Image (cartoon, helix red, strand yellow):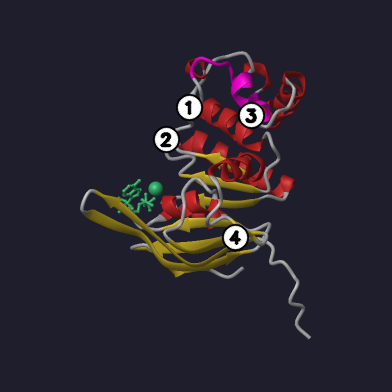
């Protein structure tokens, strides 16, 4: 007999559409996307520029809202959350890594990594202890007191990864995380991300147009013109 009370785990999108309206123009960035991503999946999201990859990532991470449809994480409906609830959800549940690392230039590496902890109300001492561990995990302990401007592109991205992991989020969302790096550095950062995901058993969605990188991930979701045209097999 079907157990009606089971809460589905993982990320679930049901008939999700997203329309951006600018003045009289409207753009359908997502068109009726339904997708289930089980916890622990590591998937590449690929597709042409403008296909809706970043929009999908933003909606999964509650950085943006659906226009219609439903998005859930472990059964929790994210579609119509209050802003403050969405912000708490992001801080505790999602780590973001972007192509531009968005580090705060006037703060040191360790202060940048501590930030999500301070926002969550950790004491500075606890946040710092945790940040030290995270900088170790990304191989950057020796650069803790440097500001972003004193670090290479690859080192900056390591700091951004450490910051994304500070709250031990179950979901990691990465948007072209190696798009700005040279080949060797890019490969190192890819290795780091894949190893961390495996070791920490995180669910990762990684947007990339680099098919070599996509091939390194167990799953692939292909988008075109706001739709998922191949959802891969989970
Ligand atoms: N904030 C926004 N305002 C208006 N249009 C947007 C916005 N973000 C994305 N779009 C549009 O939505 C479509 C999908 O964009 P995006 O998700 O960024 O694609 P991708 O990441 O695959 O390149 C594009 O046509 C883009 O111009
Ligand atoms: Mg994009």
Q: Which residue is mark 3?
A: 119
Say if the magenta span includes residue 186.
Answer: no
Look at the numbered discs 2 and 1 and tell me whether their residues touch, using CB distance below 8 Å.
Answer: yes
Report if residue 213 is visible in the image.
no
Marks 4,3: beta carbons within 8 A: no
Q: Residue furthest front?
A: 82
Against 47, residue 3 (above or below) is below
Residue 50 location (% of width, % of height): 33, 54
Mark number displayed over residue 180 = 2
- Please give the residue where the numbered disc 4 appears in the rendered image: 72
Compare marks 4 and 2 and give the one earlier in the sequence. Answer: 4
How far apart, in angstroms, are the residues tagged by discs 1 and 4? 34 Å
Q: Magenta stretch: give its range.
A: 105-119
Read off the residue under disc 1.
Answer: 153
The quarter of the picture where the N terminus appears is bottom right
User: Where residue 15 sits: x, y (%)?
Assistant: 47, 69
Q: Earlier in the sequence, mark 3 or mark 1?
A: 3
């Amino acid at each position: 007999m079907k157990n009606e009370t089971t809460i589905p785990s993982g990320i679930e999108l049901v008939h999700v559409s997203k329309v951006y309206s600018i003045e009289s123009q409207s753009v359908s960035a997502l068109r009726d996307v339904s997708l289930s991503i089980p916890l622990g999946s590591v998937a590449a999201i690929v597709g042409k520029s403008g296909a809706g990859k970043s929009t999908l990532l933003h909606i999964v991470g509650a950085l943006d809202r659906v226009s219609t449809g439903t998005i859930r994480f472990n059964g929790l409906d994210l579609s119509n959350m209050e802003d403050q609830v969405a912000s708490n959800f992001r801080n505790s549940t999602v780590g973001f890594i972007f192509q531009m690392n968005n580090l705060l230039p006037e703060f040191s590496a360790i202060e940048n990594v501590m930030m999500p902890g301070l926002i969550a109300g950790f004491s500075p001492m606890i946040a710092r202890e945790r940040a030290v561990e995270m900088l170790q995990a990304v191989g950057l302990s020796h650069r803790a007191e440097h500001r972003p401007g004193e670090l290479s592109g690859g080192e900056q991205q390591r700091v951004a990864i450490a910051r994304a992991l500070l709250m031990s989020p179950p979901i990691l969302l990465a948007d072209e995380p190696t798009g700005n790096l040279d080949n060797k550095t890019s490969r190192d950062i890819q290795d780091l991300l894949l190893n961390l995901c495996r070791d920490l058993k995180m669910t990762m969605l990684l947007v990339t147009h680099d098919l070599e990188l996509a091939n390194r991930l167990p799953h692939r979701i292909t988008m075109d013109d706001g739709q998922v045209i191949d959802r891969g097999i989970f």
